[in-house]
């Protein structure tokens, strides 16, 4: 049974500005494992796209939960890719749901959709 659906879109240029203004923004938005992946990316454009996608997915999770992120911080949520590249979203309390996440990018925006199923 579907328990929640959330979607969010983020402008990549906005994320680039936030990263440039405050390098600690990465630590606030990305989990430790996501930060490890971030630093392996070779271009500033790809890094901003990565952060924008994760940011959108975490916002979409808050919408799917119906409460916003509540007691979760962005860094408490981790989105890592499996061997085939499919993103998998993990957070405290994710054992209550089967979590589906999709992230997509254009040249200007990143969008994410989250579905929570029980």
Image (cartoon, grey):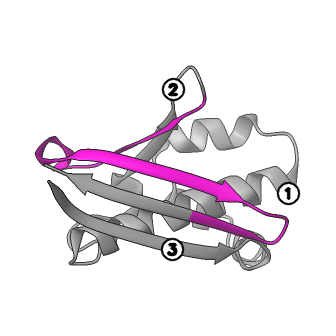
Residue depicted at 63% across the width and 75% down the height: 10
Q: CA distance from mark 3 to mark 1?
A: 20 Å
Q: Is residue 60 visible?
A: yes
Span highlighted in magenta in the image: 85-111
Looking at the image, is mark 1 or mark 2 earlier in the sequence?
1
Indicate which label's residue lies in the foreground, 3 or 1.
3
Disc with the residue nearer the chain's start (3 vs 1): 3
Task: Find residue 45 and name its label.
Answer: 1
Which disc is residue 8 wearing? Answer: 3
Q: Earlier in the sequence, mark 3 or mark 2?
A: 3
User: Residue 35: horizontal and vertical position, in percent?
Assistant: 58, 44
Q: Nearer the viewer, mark 1 or mark 2?
A: 2
Residue 72: percent from the left, percent from the top? 26, 64
- Residue visible at 23% across and 68% down? 65
* In contact (CB < 8 Å): disc 3 and disc 1: no
In this rendered view, identify the residue nearer to me: 14 or 88.
88
Whole-percent x, y for residue 83 in the image: 56, 20
């Amino acid at each position: 049974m579907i328990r929640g659906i959330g979607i969010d879109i983020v402008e990549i240029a906005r994320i680039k500005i936030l990263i440039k203004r405050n390098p600690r923004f990465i630590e606030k938005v990305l989990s430790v494992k996501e930060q490890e992946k971030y630093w392996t990316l070779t271009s500033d454009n790809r890094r901003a796209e990565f952060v924008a996608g994760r940011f959108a997915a975490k916002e979409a999770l808050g919408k799917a939960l119906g409460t916003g992120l509540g007691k979760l911080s962005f860094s408490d949520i981790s989105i890592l890719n499996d061997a085939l590249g499919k993103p998998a979203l993990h957070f405290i309390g994710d054992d209550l749901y089967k979590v589906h996440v999709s992230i997509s990018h254009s040249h200007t925006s990143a969008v994410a959709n989250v579905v929570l199923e029980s």
